[in-house]
Image (cartoon, rainbow, N blue to C red):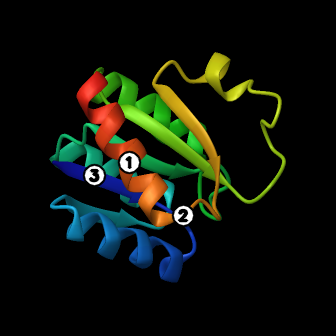
């Protein structure tokens, strides 16, 4: 399965990528909104791991574009901040399926990827 990681911290994104690849997934990385939208224009990603706070661009815009371009795509939002800690991300983004800390263990993230891919 194809997975897109949109994360402004390249070492973290690469760690997740390697872990998901070991689970048999094809994983692409983007570090900003423009790159993510380019990827979404070229490839269908059933699961997107998306940092809530992007240095360049808006995570909401990426999720919105994914919803338009790939209506069945699910988004796992990750963050290292308290933004949306009230759960409002689920009201803003209809394709949000999870909201977890950036420090989530790679095994747990891989389990969520596999779970939500089966659900969609």
Q: CA distance from mark 1 to mark 2?
A: 10 Å
Q: Which mark is residue 105?
A: 2
90 vs 1, left or right, is: right
Is the C-beta separation of discs 3 and 2 under 8 Å? no
Residue at the spot of label 1: 111
Q: CA distance from mark 1 to mark 3?
A: 13 Å
Q: CA distance from mark 3 to mark 2?
A: 17 Å
Image quadrant in which you'd find residue 29:
bottom left
Q: Which mark is residue 3?
A: 3
User: Crowding near pointer 1: few (<14 within 10 Å), some, many (20+)?
Assistant: some
x and y, in percent, of residue 80 in the image: 74, 60
x and y, in percent, of residue 51 in the image: 58, 54
Is the C-beta separation of discs 1 and 3 under 8 Å? no
Q: Is residue 72 above or below residue 113?
A: above
Q: Quick one: quadrant of the C terminus?
A: top left
Q: Secondary structure at mark 2?
A: loop
* Residue appearing at x 31%, y 30% in the figure: 73
- Depth check, front residue: 65 or 5: 5
99 vs 62, left or right, is: right
């Amino acid at each position: 399965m194809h997975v897109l990681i949109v994360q402004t911290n390249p070492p973290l994104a690469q760690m997740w990528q390697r872990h998901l690849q070991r689970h048999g997934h094809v994983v692409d990385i983007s570090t900003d909104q423009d790159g993510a939208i380019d990827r979404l224009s070229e490839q269908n990603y059933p699961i997107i791991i998306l940092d809530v706070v992007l240095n360049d661009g808006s995570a909401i815009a990426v999720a919105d574009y994914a919803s338009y371009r790939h209506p069945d795509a699910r988004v796992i939002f990750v963050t290292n901040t308290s933004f949306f800690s009230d759960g409002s991300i689920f009201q803003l983004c209809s394709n949000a399926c999870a909201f977890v800390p950036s420090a989530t263990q790679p095994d747990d993230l891989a389990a969520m990827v596999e779970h939500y891919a089966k659900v969609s």
